[in-house]
Amino acid sequence: MNIHFDTHFKKQIITILPGEFFSTDKDVLISTLLGSCISIAIFDPENKSGGLNHFMLPTTNRIKEISSEEQGRYGNFAIELLINDMLKKGSKKENLTAKIFGGSNVLDDCGYHPNSTGVNNILFALDYLSTEKIPITANDTGGIFPRKIFYNPRTAKIFLKRIQRSDLTLKEIKQRESIYKEKIQNEQIKAGDITWF
């Protein structure tokens, strides 16, 4: 997590990375850069508070306990961590709404692939929020362009910029996602397979 003051927005910006989340009722912006990852912006209109997460994969098949540092990488943990953090700060679950961003196919220029990481992340997020009965008020997912988002947790407004494919940042996102994907796969291999009895 990185915190700095932005002269354009004239606000403090909290930048979260993959696996991180942040919630607050302060007048700040929460920012992140998304490729195939997903961010869910949760808002409580009663408390005028909100939070944002950034997860890389829907779930994990690891059989060992996952450390708290790793949990936020996976959607099933990341959404729960964010919701629980907001509930601890006074939100009520029945008041929460959500906006979903990300899930683009940045590692392949051909567009939609039904089994891509981005598509799996999108489907997981939609299903999870539906199961939790949290209404989705905005959904900007899929496609081939990475997104940079700035979320105002007091108003639920999102400032979104699609990053063009010629931009140097695209290389950075592809490299970052490839490294994370390889790291996670290596961790899953080390954890071993399930043996059924």
Image (cartoon, rainbow, N blue to C red):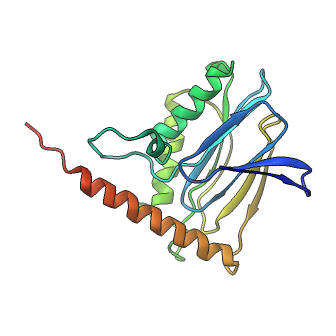
Q: Is residue 60 left or right of residue 15?
A: left
Q: How many marks?
A: 0
Seen at 71% across and 69% down, the residue is: 163
Left or right? Give the position of 90 relative to 133: right
**Image height of 33 relative to 41, above or below:** below
Q: Quadrant of residue 106?
A: bottom right
Which residue is most to the left?
A: 197
Residue at 53% over, 72% down = 175
Visible residue check, residue 111 = no
Residue 47 placed where, x, y %?
77, 22
43 or 51, nearer to the observer: 51
Report if residue 134 is visible in the image.
Answer: yes
Q: At 58% across and 48% down in the image, what residue appears?
A: 54
Q: Quadrant of the C terminus?
A: top left
Residue 166: give x, y in percent of width and height: 69, 81
Quadrant of residue 63 in the image?
top left
Residue depicted at x 59% and y 62%: 35
Q: Whole-percent x and y of residue 42?
A: 67, 35
Left or right for 62, reference 108: left
Pinpoint residue 74: horizontal percent, then vertical percent: 46, 46
